[in-house]
Image (cartoon, rainbow, N blue to C red):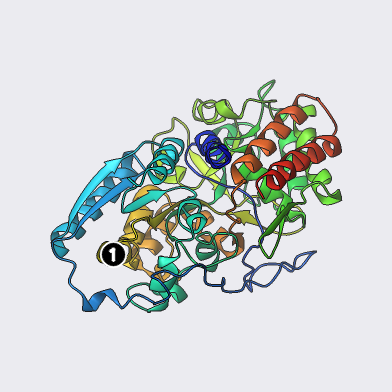
Amino acid sequence: MKNMKKILCVILSLAMLAGTLSACVSQYVSKETTPAPTQAPPATQPPATGGDATQGETPAPTEEVSIAGTTLDVWYAVSGTSGELFTAQSEKFAKEFDVKLNLSYTGGSGDTATKVAAAQLNDTAPDVALMYAGPLYTGGKDNYDIDALIKTGSGFDINDVFEGMMDYCVYMGQGYCAVPYGISTQVLYYNKDLLKNAGVDMTNPPKTWDEFKTLLKDLKGKVGGNMVFDTSDQAWLFKSMLMQNGCEIIDNKDGEITPIFNNAQAVAVADFWHSLVTDGLMAAGEHGNAESTFLSGNLAFIAASSNRISRWNGTTTFELGAIEMPYFTQPSLALGGNVLVILTRDEAKVRAAWKYLCYLTNVENNTAFALGTGYLPIHKSALEMDSVKKAIEENEMYGVAFKQLDYTWAYTHFEQMGTMDTEIRSMLNKLEKNRGTSEELLTSAVNALQKEIDADK
């Protein structure tokens, strides 16, 4: 019953996120181009290897073993253009390597989490899955086959993948148990026509949240009673804002998770969030309607996933623009998106699955998937490709999303992360509706999460 409770908490969080999971954080990757933070982040270290991948032996490189004739069951949680591109690349792989892939769309993030969790309970899980929060279903089950396979140096150049994206594939600070595929950050989109008609100049966009709030107040007076800012995923944005203000969300010491997002820095962020509502700049508890409101032309700014770049570009009745996300004391953004995991423990299928994952995530295929969907390329070298340079030249929003990669980080996957997002979302809803002070509500959320962590020990 206790395990089922954990699973249901994760599923609830995933279902509410609807497109990108963004749970708790422990570190972020700091680049040389990033301004020096007020509180220096902990140095990024390679994760320790998790449980034995194959009874203590590292799998041999897959290039030396034929995988022809292998059958793999594959579940995936992306639809629309993303699903079409994923299945097209998968079918090409199957033909090229004489492998049979049983591809099954298993619904959105919540549906797929439900099905994978249930399948693992009765040993009917697929061999491979493209899903959100994938490390919960591999590292959480002491499955670190991918960590061992990466170390063979076969087919996956970890040195060419953005560090934060690899951190996104780690469970509890242990070994790699997934590989990144469809990764995104939040971007601050805006309605160019609305701002132009209001006489707001975006030539030099705001850098900090205080500057952004000043702009919103000016805009508010020119567009009447309409709200001028919102976000389609409040928990994702709030956690980025916490790190921007020097506030770690959890402390992970040797596998002991302690929530710490109720300190002075966190209270300051929550107070700022509340002021957006009290100043009439953001509607209270209406984040579920934010996208439709923005696309209807009735909202000036929205913080939403970068995968909306391709989804929205050319489909709106107004000209669409985007700028980098504002910050408090330092630029900082949490990564979100989906990863590829190997769930089978059958040696022959693991080898075939690894070849499949390496194929999907090579520079050419992953970059093509990214440019076709609005997700971000996982490879550093992709930014030097002509196709990426052309995309940035033709669509300034891609340039914004790619630039933000300089200060992105990955959250820590841990068992109670579903409760984490649920509590943060609930806290913000209460805060926006004046049901407590920032300090009271943050402390209540931290205590609720800590209670579950303690109960699950």
Q: Is residue 325 visible?
A: yes
Q: Is residue 304 above or below residue 263?
A: above
Q: Is residue 201 visible?
A: no
Q: Picture coordinates of residue 126 (x, y %)?
A: 31, 49
**Position of 93 compared to 253: left or right?**
left
Residue tagged 1? 359
**Position of 392 compared to 49: left or right?**
left
Residue at (77, 54) in percent of width and height: 245
**Position of 203 compared to 360: left or right?**
right
Residue nearest the viewer, comparing 303 with 42: 42
The image quarter in which residue 94 lies: bottom left
Amino acid on which the number 1 mark rests in the picture: Tyr
> So how many labels did they put on this image?
1
The N terminus lies in quadrant = top right
Q: Is residue 213 above or below residue 37?
A: above
Q: Picture coordinates of residue 103 (x, y %)?
A: 24, 46
Q: Residue furthest top?
A: 225
Residue at (58, 32) in percent of width and height: 194
Q: Picture coordinates of residue 55 (x, y %)?
A: 40, 71
Q: Picture coordinates of residue 410 (x, y %)?
A: 58, 58
